[in-house]
Amino acid sequence: MRLTDEEKGMRDGAEGAAVAAAMDLLIRYGGALGAGHLCDVRNVATSMTQPSPVKARLVREGGWDKAFAVISLDSDEDLQVPPMRVATCQLQHGFGADAGAVVPYPAQMIALQGDAEAFYGRHGVNILATCTPYQVGNIPVRGEHIAWMESSAVIYANSVLGARTNCEGTASTGAAALTGKVPCWGNHRDEGRYGTHLIDVQVRVDDFTEWGMLGYFTGGLVGEERPVLAGDLGRPGLAELKHFGAAAATSGGVELYHLPGITPEAPTVEAAFGPAPVPAAVTYGPRERRAVYAGLNSQGTSTHVDFVLLGCPHASVDQIRQAAAALDGRRLSAGTHLWLMVPRALKDVADRSGYTETIERAGGKVLADSCPAMSRAAPPGTRVFATDSAKQAHYLPAILGIEAWFGTLAQCVDAAVTGRWRGELS
């Protein structure tokens, strides 16, 4: 790998042992990927404060410096963590102390996380605690090289914002935060960003649920490749684009997509494919739509709903407002819980706007920082849940061993109020 003089200095210890370990990791990582050089990055989204039994053991043995060295630098050396070199934020993690009376989440994990936040905050990590950092101020610009984790965040950054990142891990983002470098391959390079598949959308896609189903179909079709979608598409907003991307990254491994005339790197279908010819299109029509809906609802048998989950990826202010409006003047069925997952910064907006009060008056809860999939926590006794998130309908049955129903916000609120699933495909 070709290194600049600055990078050679980092490798050789000019900026301390921790930075040297970080550069060593990046050189090994880049070599395994076949990257010829490193990119400069100034924006990292990572998972340093997520508590776990492994981190608890490492902290007992040598403090947070040791935990960072082992988990984020793949190093067994006795290192002292310096301040982060570039802007770095913490993505979603475990539930905070304010959820302790609501969520069955271990108190020792909440305490460990609090210690981690204090440590990493002193070292320059912004504790945004959300899978949607672009909703709370971390908005990289088009063409900017970044190092982000979390599949739904990565696909949004690449596709909607036009920034450049691969789906990184804890170690590579930890090393990037200390060096401002990451291997230059994949989505960082022009040739790695052109479309590979064309999907012809022949049914109208113009609301949150329809965008989620289209995303789930797309990921299942293309796997880890780069879809281009055209046809009967309405103009999506932030919520629809993050929902589509999360679903595509869940059923497949999509990190980048193009919507000609909507996303920034695809003014036309031809431009989305660059120098390659436009391939034959695959149809998404009424039959495919019905099959996606049936697949997402194939893990539900009982129509008795214990739990309704909204806000995956974390809800926008508009989504919080819509949920509050749907619940206004209503009351949850006895024995049915509703959680709405939001970024903590937007919970403050919801509190001040009266949305939280409306939702809680109905019996629901507005929770920040995490989600049931990240924290593996649902209301006690949950057997069947309903959600408007294709991502959570996919993951939670496997993670928590519960049944799932997928549908619209209105259908989910109806389930919360009646305790029964009555949703169907319109």
Image (cartoon, grey):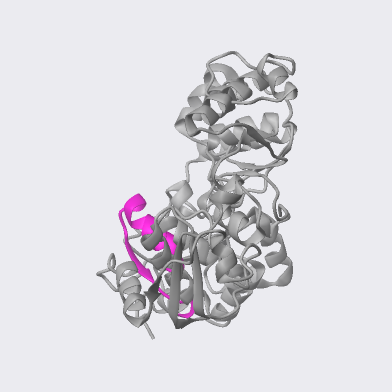
Q: Is 408 in the magenta?
A: yes
Query: What is the magenta range?
Result: 387-410
Can you say which quadrant of the picture contains the C terminus?
A: bottom left
Q: Nearer the viewer, residue 198 or 93?
A: 198
Residue at x 41%, y 74% (from the top left corner): 407
- Where residue 13 appears, as percent x and y from the top left, is 69, 14
Q: Which of the 4 image quarters holds residue 318?
A: bottom right
> Is residue 357 at all visible to an observer of this figure?
no
> Is residue 319 at all visible to an observer of this figure?
yes
Report the side of 115 relative to 50 (left or right). right
Q: Which of the 4 image quarters holds residue 116?
A: top right
- Where residue 104 appears, as percent x and y from the top left, is 45, 49
Q: Nearer the viewer, residue 97 or 207?
A: 207
Report the side of 149 relative to 287 (left or right). right
Q: Residue furthest bottom?
A: 426
Residue at x 48%, y 35% (from the top left corner): 52
Q: Residue furthest left?
A: 301
Q: Is residue 123 above or below residue 224?
A: above
Q: Is 389 in the magenta?
A: yes
- Where residue 223 appears, as percent x and y from the top left, is 39, 55
Residue at x 31%, y 79% (from the top left corner): 287
